[in-house]
Amino acid sequence: MNIFKTLWNDESGASAAEYALILAIVGTGIAIAAATLGGAISNAMDQASTCIQQEGVGTGDLTKCQAE
């Protein structure tokens, strides 16, 4: 019974577990932000590429392709 009381009162590993949890939450947030930003950049590049292909290279008139 004393072993369970000792284990129950032992808080030496609590700090490491808390840091691991914080690291996991922050890491997940960074991964989600990177995926979202990557998707936004990809969409913007696709739109720019489509606009350039539609207008033709060297026409100089890309006003139709400006942000809507």
Image (cartoon, helix red, strand yellow):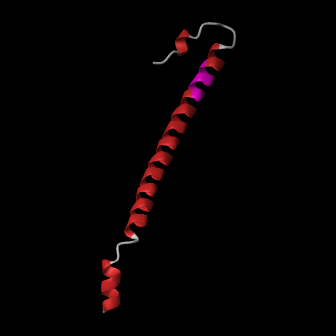
Q: Nearer the viewer, residue 41 or 34?
A: 34
47 magenta-colored: yes
Residue extent of the magenta highlight: 45-51
Residue drawn 53% across and 37% down? 39
Magenta span: chief secondary structure: helix
In the depicted structure, whether residue 28 falls above or below residue 4: above
Quadrant in the picture for residue 5: bottom left
**How many marks do you count on the picture?**
0
Task: Please state the horizontal and vertical placement of residue 8, each as a whole percent of the image.
Answer: 31, 80
Task: Please state the horizontal and vertical placement of residue 3, each as a whole percent of the image.
Answer: 35, 89
In the depicted structure, whether residue 63 falls above or below residue 54: above
Residue drawn 63% across and 18% down? 52
Task: Please state the horizontal and vertical placement of residue 2, each as a whole percent of the image.
Answer: 31, 90
* Residue farthest top in this picture: 60
Q: Nearer the viewer, residue 35 or 20?
A: 20
Residue drawn 39% across and 62% down? 18
Q: Nearer the viewer, residue 59 or 44?
A: 44
* Residue farthest right in this picture: 58
Left or right for 46, reference 21: right
Q: Quadrant of the N terminus?
A: bottom left
Task: Please state the horizontal and vertical placement of residue 31, each as a whole percent of the image.
Answer: 50, 47
60 magenta-colored: no
Left or right for 52, reference 18: right
Left or right for 60, reference 14: right
Residue drawn 60% across and 7% down? 61
